[in-house]
């Protein structure tokens, strides 16, 4: 038995509509690096875009399936209500000014668990938050030119899940995944993963009278927790199944291996392995520059490249 408590979030996967608007926002506004450009393995005419720090460290990775004709989702219980990115404590004025200059509407700063939060949305209406944290967790800073390291987003702070009843989800987090209870503010309870890495917090926002969310563009599809490798993941698979959860077999996602299950409020959880990681099929300097395909789709590359939309970043300047 080598299983340790879950170290925090590995990645978050969401749905976008237009891939070019998605890249422009996450790369050019938030300063995240496009670390991998591949396709949805179950729907290879759709991109799968991954953003993160310079190397795509676990806890920094936001991924999207851009489906052009997907109607916008409606927030509700049973899903991720907001995704929080960490910023250094002094970076609030920088981000307020940056968002204002880019005509992105943001809330006035509020305080939550002693940290400052500003809220805004991505081009598909997906709720995002910038949350200060003096811990200054380590990431591999990517210098894209106009955001210095003192202001840069430092991976995920965590997510807020909208739930009818927090208790059964809290039970999964604390009893099965090894999260610890941090505290409660009104209807928000906070849980922390067991490390000093980034992406540590899961907040449960209890909203007993809110309807179930409707999935669509701007919705988070699932959140993924970290495990080190296949052996540790296998121990989690057994543990979750023993607890009566309906867990999928292991899926090969090329850059990590995944199992999925729905927690009691309906949020889709994944447990992903840190290994093999995003340097598996291209070196650091080349991450995200060209379309990468798994071996089983490589024979269809010509057709896939014809079907996926052209990206603005590939057009000659
Ligand atoms: Zn995933």
Image (tube, grey):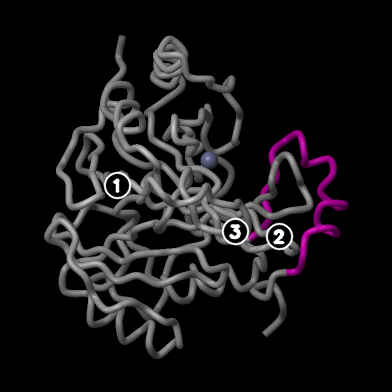
First reached walking from the N terminus: tag 1 or tag 3: 3
Question: Circle 2 — which element?
Answer: loop
Residue occupying the point 37% across, 28% down: 228
Q: Nearer the viewer, residue 149 or 60?
A: 60
Whole-percent x and y of residue 238?
44, 12
Quarter of the image with the C terminus is bottom right
Could you tell me which secondary element the residue under label 1 belongs to? strand
Q: Which residue is rendered at x = 85% and y = 59% of the image?
A: 306
User: How far from the left and from the top, in percent, is residue 211?
Assistant: 50, 50
Quadrant of res 219: bottom right
The residue tagged 1 is: 203
As measured in the structure, the alpha-carbon distance from the residue carrying label 1 to the one carrying label 3 is 21 Å
Q: Which range of residues does the magenta coloring cover?
A: 290-310
Identify the disc placed on residue 2.
none
Query: Which disc number belongs to residue 73?
Result: 3
Compute the Cα span from label 2 to label 1.
Answer: 28 Å
Provide the secondary structure element on which disc 3 rests.
loop
Residue corresponding to mark 2: 70
């Amino acid at each position: 038995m080598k299983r340790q408590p879950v170290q925090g979030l590995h990645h978050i996967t969401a749905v976008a509509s237009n891939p070019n608007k998605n890249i422009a926002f996450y790369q050019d506004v938030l300063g995240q690096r496009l670390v991998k450009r591949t396709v949805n393995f179950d729907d290879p005419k759709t991109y799968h875009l991954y953003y993160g720090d310079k190397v795509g460290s676990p806890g920094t990775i936001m991924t999207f399936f851009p489906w052009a004709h997907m109607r916008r989702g409606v927030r509700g219980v049973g899903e991720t209500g907001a995704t929080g990115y960490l910023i250094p404590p002094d970076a609030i004025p920088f981000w307020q000014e940056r968002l204002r200059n880019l005509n992105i509407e943001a809330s006035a700063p509020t305080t939550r668990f002693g940290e400052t939060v500003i809220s805004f949305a991505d081009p598909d209406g997906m709720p995002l938050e910038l949350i200060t944290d003096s811990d200054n967790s380590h990431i591999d800073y990517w210098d894209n030119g106009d955001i210095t390291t003192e202001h840069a987003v430092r991976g995920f702070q965590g997510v807020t899940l909208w739930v009818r009843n927090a208790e059964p989800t809290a039970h999964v987090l604390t009893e099965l995944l090894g999260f610890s209870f941090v505290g409660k503010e009104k209807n928000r309870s906070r849980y922390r993963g067991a490390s000093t890495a980034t992406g540590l917090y899961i907040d449960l926002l209890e909203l007993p009278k809110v309807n179930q969310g409707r999935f669509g563009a701007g919705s988070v599809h699932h959140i993924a927790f970290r495990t080190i490798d296949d052996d540790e993941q296998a121990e989690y698979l057994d543990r979750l199944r023993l607890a009566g959860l309906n867990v999928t077999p292991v899926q090969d996602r090329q850059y990590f291996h995944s199992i999925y299950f729905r927690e009691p409020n309906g949020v889709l959880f994944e447990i992903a392995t840190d290994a093999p990681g995003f340097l598996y099929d291209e070196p650091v300097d080349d991450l995200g520059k060209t379309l990468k395909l798994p071996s089983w789709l490589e024979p269809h590359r010509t057709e896939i490249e014809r079907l996926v939309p052209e990206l603005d970043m590939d057009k000659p300047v």
